[in-house]
Each structure stands twice: as structure tokens, then as C-alpha cells.
Image: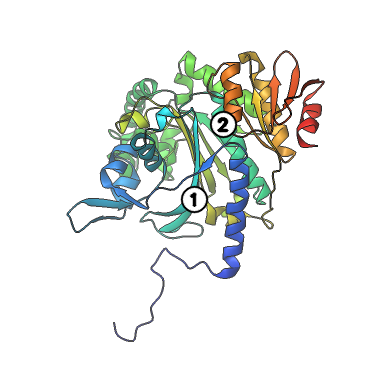
Amino acid sequence: MAGSKLQAPRGTFDVLPADAVRRDRLVGLSAHVLEGAGYAHTETPIFEDTALFARGVGESTDIVQKEMFTFEDKGGRSLTLRPENTAGICRAYIEHGMHKLPQPVKLWSWGPFFRHEAPQAGRYRQFTQLDVEALGSDDPSLDAELIVLLAQILERSGVKARLLLSSLGNADTRAEYGEELRAHLGAHESELSDEVRSRIDTNPLRAFDSDHPGTRSAMEEAPRLIDRLDREDIDHFGEVRALLEQAGCAYELDPTLVRGLDYYTRTVFEFESDDLGAQRGVGGGGRYDGLVEKLGGPATPGVGWAAGVERVLLASQREVEGAYFPMRAYVVVPKAEERPLAFRLVQALRDAGALAEMEQAGRSVKGQMKQADRVDATHVVIAGDSLEVRDMQTGEQHEVASVEDAVRAVTQ
């Protein structure tokens, strides 16, 4: 209308210079933390074929059913502004043959995403996310590493958050549990909200997310998926928990924790902050071991997370810190039983200001040394029967007595 006042569309906002400084600092801090752990920066298009999200995210999800911004281009092709990034990263992994690279492939990105939601504090229709993915390994240390990295970013950003943790098991276990949960929901159908009733057949797990009083009451006695895990998934989840404890990362078990996307398997997690009010989530994710295959690629395990930039800054209690990393260390793990020590060593190195990563793809010691060369490590720390530090420039190698001594040898 002529003369009307033009404003940013509902659910969007302008980033003014003062706000841009905080955002840039958060992205810069995240880049240092993530690249220090071996994650490489990447970007994907902000729109993709609609089929990617329908197949990857899931036809029964709120995102696909209600929230996507979908349009036809001039050639009549259906395209969608990306509502999340994991499906796009998996598409890129397949399209560019990344399965041929040394695994796991560790990637991070950030940028705008789009969902047609009701705008509220910290929730927008165009929003910015940090996204981190590791593809090509089902090693529990990747799950734990990603959780610890997000915890570090939140802590250094001044966010007080608690970690909720659970496991959804594998696809077969989840399918069997789904039938059991459907039977429970069917027995309590009269108590459920209309939305939950409409999802009993397609996505019964989302009943755990409902705020409807009758539904919440019915779900108090519902069976829990975490009690139905098979031995392999129990062991995997147990190692994730043990590694988090080794790293000093506190968590709360939440058997009702479900993610809003269909592709999750095994580990799921979310960081919540009471400083955000009713919508407490600042970031979360989990493992998605079947997604690449579902999108037409080879069988490829994966795990990742996303964190909302606006939500992190809204929950932040202080200015975001800077970071600088002068050294890069690679921790070689000769035997599986040394993995907890290696994981603790990596965290200690990062805390001391070094870039650090560890072996997570089952390579031989020789292969691990080659990987250390590939990532341009300045030092290798061999976490075997004893701790040994090698200076990759001089070739000198010596034994150290403790993790603290190893850290000093790398950083001084």
C-alpha cells in the first residue's frame, strides 16, 4: 500500500552493528573451538530440493508438515528454504564422494535457516544456527566430543546450561518400541490432545513433547525407549556417558528426551538454559546412523548438533571470549583400552589453548601417524602403556610422566 511503513517481515529481524559484534565474536569463538578439534568449515545452499527434507527430516515431522518455506522455481521444480542443515550436509557428503576421504569427516557451518513458526523470544522464522557434523564413524568418542565442544562454546559464551542426555537405540529397537508406545497411546486415546491422536500411527514419540495436561498425565506411565535398548546400544551409550564423566561434563539422564526429527538414533542430547523462559533449548542434537543411506548414499554413521546463535546470545551472561591456538596436537591411541586416557588428554590440551584431536576411526598406529601429518600436527602424543610426546618438526620423542607433563610439552 502506497505510503505504508515498510518493516522487516514478521519473525525476522535486522542485525545492527552493535549486535553484529557479539554475533561475530560467537562465530569466531566457535570456529576456534571447532577447528581446534579437527572440524573444517563448510557451507551448503540456503535452499535445496524439497524432497531432501521430506525424505531426510521425515514426512511426519512438524517441520515438513507445517513449517517449511516451499516454492516452485521458474522451471516448476519444488525448492525449500533450509529448515535445518544435517540433511544438506549428508547430501553434500554423498554428492562429493566424501566417503572416500579419511573418516570421520568433521564439518562445521553457520548461517540462516527458515521455519514458519509462531515468533516469540529467541524463536524466529529466519534464524541463525551453528551446525556441527561428524560422518563416517560410530565411535562413541565422537558423540562425547561433540557434546563437550558445545558445552565449551556455551560456557565460554557466558551461558549457564544443563545437559539432558538419552539414547533412542537403533532403528529396529525404535520400531518395536513404537508399536508398544502406540498400544499405550491407544489405551489412553480419550485423554490425548487432538494433535497427539493424529500422530499415533506416524510419530508416537512426539507425545513426550506435548504440554497438553491430559497427554502429559497419560505419558507418565508410558514405557520408556531407554529401557528397551539392546546390548550393543547399551554399551555404546555407556561409553558415551563414561567419556563425558572422564571429561568432567555433567549431565542429567532424561528418558523422555526425543528430538523433533525422524533421523535420530542412539545418542540424543539437549542443552537447556533457564534464562530463556519457556523455550529453554539453546542447542542439541544426536546420532543419525541411517540418514546418509536413506538419502541414497553408502551406509554411513553420523552424529552432530545445532545451536541457535540468537538463543545463545539471549542466554549469555557476559561478553563472548576470544581464543587463540598456537599449537596443534594429535593423540595417537595404540589400544582401545587407552581411549579414556586419550580423551581426557585431548580435553586437557584444548583447555590449555592447543588445537587437539584424537584417533576416532580405528586406524593402525602407522595410519594414525599419517593422519597426524595430514592435519599438520606440530606434536603427536602417543597414549599407550606410557605417554610419549613427539615433536613433528624435529622428530624428537620422549616419555612423560603424566597428562599434565604431556600438555606442558606440547604448549611450552
The residue carrying pointer 1 sits among few (fewer than 14), some (14 to 19) or many (20 or more) residues within 10 Å by Cα, namely: many
What residue is drawn where x is 56% and y is 20%?
A: 367
Residue 165 visible in the displayed image: yes
The image quarter containing residue 398 is top right
Q: Amino acid at mark 1?
A: Trp
Q: Nearer the viewer, residue 362 or 140?
A: 362
Question: Mark 2 against mark 1, which lies toward the viewer?
Answer: 2
What residue is drawn where x is 34% and y is 47%?
A: 63
Total count of labels: 2
**Image quarter of the N terminus:** bottom left
Specify the color scheme.
rainbow
What residue is drawn where x is 71% and y is 43%?
A: 326
**Which residue is denoted by mark 1 in the rendering?**
110
**Image quarter of the C terminus:** top right
The image quarter containing residue 261 is top left
Picture layout, residue 403 above or below residue 197: above
Q: Amino acid at mark 2?
A: Arg
Across and down, in percent, residue 269 comes to 52, 36
Picture layout, residue 75 above or below residue 375: below
Is there CB contact under 8 Å for labels 2 and 1? no
**Which residue is denoted by mark 2 in the rendering?**
374
Across and down, in percent, residue 179 comes to 32, 24
Dot placed on the residue nearer the N-terminal end, 2 or 1: 1
Across and down, in percent, residue 241 comes to 60, 25
The image quarter containing residue 140 is top right
Identity of the residue furthest to the left in this view: 76
Identity of the residue furthest to the front in this view: 394
Determine whether the residue tagged by mark 2 lies in a helix, strand or loop: helix
